[in-house]
Each structure stands twice: as C-alpha cells, then as structure tokens.
Image (spheres, grey):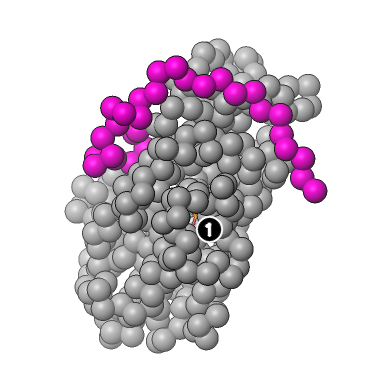
Amino acid sequence: MTETLEIKITKTSNSRLAQTDFENLPFGQIFTDHMFVADYADGEWKNLEIIPYGDILVSPAISSLHYGQSFFEGLKAYRHADGKISIFRPDKNAARFNKSADRLCMPALPEETFIQSIAALVDIDRDWIPSKPGYSLYLRPYMFATDRYLGVAPSKSYKYMVLACPVGAYFSKTLRVKIEDHYTRAAEGGMGYAKSSGNYGVSMYPARKAAEEGFDQLIWTDAKEHKYIEEMGAANAMFVLDGKLITPIAGDTILDGVTRNTVITLAKEWGYPVEERKVSVEEIMEGAKNGKLTDAFGAGTAATIASVGSISHNGEEYTLIDPKDREFSQRVLKTIDAIRYGNAPDTHGWNYIVG
Ligand SMILES: *Cc1c(COP(=O)(O)O)cnc(C)c1O
C-alpha cells in the first residue's frame, strides 16, 4: 500500500480563475492558482507544500543557473465527460524524472512523491481544467540545484516544483520540416535521453536558423555522420514506410517518449508491423520521393501527433500526402484522445484517476 504524503496546503485568497479567458490560452503562459514546492537537503526531501502560484526568492549563486543542474517533465491532466479528472501515464514520467536526475547527479524523487504531488495540485486546481474537446491541463514538474556555490560540483540542495497551465487544443498545422545535417542536439555518451534544460538551450540556435530558411521544425540526425534520423524538434520521429511503423531506437541520444511508447503499443495491438531501429535519412527521402512514405509525424505530449507536411534535405524537398488522408496517425490520435478523455475503455490502465 502506498502512504499518503504529508503535504502542507496554503490556499490562495485571491483566485485568478474568474478573470482567466479560457477562449485564449497561449501555451505555457497562463498558470493556475497554486504550485507545488519541496526542498531537498541533508539527504532527504522535506517541506512538501502547495502554495499560491508566484515568484520565488533564490540566491544569485545557485548552481543550476551557472552549470545547468536542472531538468523537467511534461504531462497532462484531462477532464472526462462525467467530471472525473485523469492524468495520463504519470508513472512513466516519474521513472523518466529519475533517469534525468541520475544523469545530472541529482537526487531521485520517490515515484509516489512525484505522482501524489501532481495529483494533489491537480485536485486543488481542478476547476482550472478546461472541459472543451482537445483542451487539458499541462503539468510541469522540474528540479533544480540550489546550493550557493560557484564551484563546479553537484549541489547538495535542490528544489522540486510543479506548475500547471490550462492549455487549448494544439493547432496542428502541417509542418515544413528540414533534416539537419550540421548541428547536433545530442551525441553518444551525452544526455539526449534526459529531459535536461541544457538540451533545449542548445537546440534553439539551429531551430532559429531553420526558421530563417522558412522551416517550422527540424529533424535531428546522429552527431557522427548525420546519416540517421534521431528526433523531430522536442518530439519523437515516427514514420509509416512501406506499410510499417518505423522509429529510431530510444537510446543514448533519443528521449524515451511516453507518446512514442503509447503509439507503438497501440500499433502492435492493431497488428501493424513495428520496427524500432536505425532509420536512415536516405530511406526516408527515397520513400518521400516514391510515395512509400505514407505518414510522418512527431510524437510528444504537447501535440500528441505533429504531422510532417513536407520534408527537405540538402535542397531536395518533397510534400507528403495530406494529413487528413493518413490512416495511421488519424487512427492513433483518435484512439489516444478517446482513452484520455474517458470515451473509450482504458484497457492498459494508462489513466491515473484523481477523482
Ligand atoms: C518531451 C520530449 C519528447 C516527447 O516525450 P513525451 O513523453 O511523449 O512527451 C521527445 N523528445 C524530446 C527531446 C522531448 O524533450
């Protein structure tokens, strides 16, 4: 049996809920009334609290600012038609949270603490969860080093926090995508598999370059040869080529996405051939050219499925079939949504019911 955590709760006396415009929810800019905070010191997690959302006071010397001991997670809570609230597969995020922590010499957080902290925050701010189709509450757990020390060494103190943002339906325009063959997000032996803050800072410059060339997104390739596909922006790259679902193996350089795992699980159940393997740039460009590439998308929590409209490499560019006509990604998106919103049986136990 799991014990219920002791969480001190201080509710806001000044809710912003009534003033919030739920018709206009730019991603990651509207925060709920509360946030979760906990401190790590002397080898243990303490001061577990839910407090009103607001600025925090930190030392200018905290080592997360200087040396990047900082990482995060991203997951969502959904409102079902019967009013129940669920969080999608938080156990997966809890496990990945600790993988990231380990890579950065940061302390583990018990998985139960991770899940219960999030569930408690979602419960207190449950009125913030939109009920419109496609809408949800985005949850952002994160950890950062708080020692006041300018030496390069793992901090001894940390903060774990959770923020929550109501978000609208992701407007999935089809993306004009470029296969990157110079810049690198992650290398063998690096930290690509961790959701460490530094991985996102490093991706901004190449993303800006690609945007200047008119692309919406880039596809990362291996650091050594730029011959194999790794990820698409901050989402896992997935393709249907010759009737098979193919995706790169989630190894050192590739984040083990929850959405990726969900898509693969469903595909296998439907009897789709699935191949987790090296995916070469050459075979994808060839498939785009000869029409055997019938689906291409990024899989991640924010968009679920972000469809690739056209794909470009070395000045060669091909437009893929209209996303409306893509059998696989349409079916996947519909199925995942039905499960998350409680409109289809949750046969895998993916929904963590808050109540
Ligand atoms: C978060 C993220 C993903 C998607 O993971 P999900 O668990 O599906 O949200 C994929 N790649 C990168 C680099 C990411 O940061």
- Residue depicted at x 42% and y 31%: 32
Residue 41 % position (x, y): 73, 22
Span shown in magenta: 1-30
Helix, strand or loop for disc 1: loop
Q: Which residue is mark 1?
A: 257
Q: Is residue 28 above or below residue 278?
A: above
What's the magenta bit mostly, secondary-structure-wise? loop
- Residue depicted at x 56% and y 20%: 10
Residue 86 % position (x, y): 52, 51
Q: Is residue 33 visible?
A: yes
Residue 46 % position (x, y): 72, 24
Q: Is residue 204 visible?
A: no
Q: Quadrant of residue 115?
A: top right
Q: As drawn, is 26 to the left or to the right of 196?
A: left
Q: As drawn, is 144 to the left or to the right of 232?
A: right
Q: Is mark 1 within 8 Å of ligand 1?
A: yes
Residue neighbourhood size for the residue with mark 1, other residues' Cα within 10 Å, grouped as few (<14), some (14–19), many (≥20): many
Q: Quadrant of residue 48?
A: top right
- Residue depicted at x 28% and y 84%: 291
In reply to whether residue 24 is colored magenta, the answer given is yes
Q: Is residue 159 above or below residue 296?
A: above
89, 97: nearer the viewer = 89
- Residue depicted at x 71% and y 34%: 5
Indicate the amino acid at tag 1.
Gly
219, 273: nearer the viewer = 273
Residue 104 % position (x, y): 64, 38
Count the labels in the image.
1
Q: As drawn, is 309 to the left or to the right of 65?
A: left
In reply to whether residue 21 is colored magenta, the answer given is yes
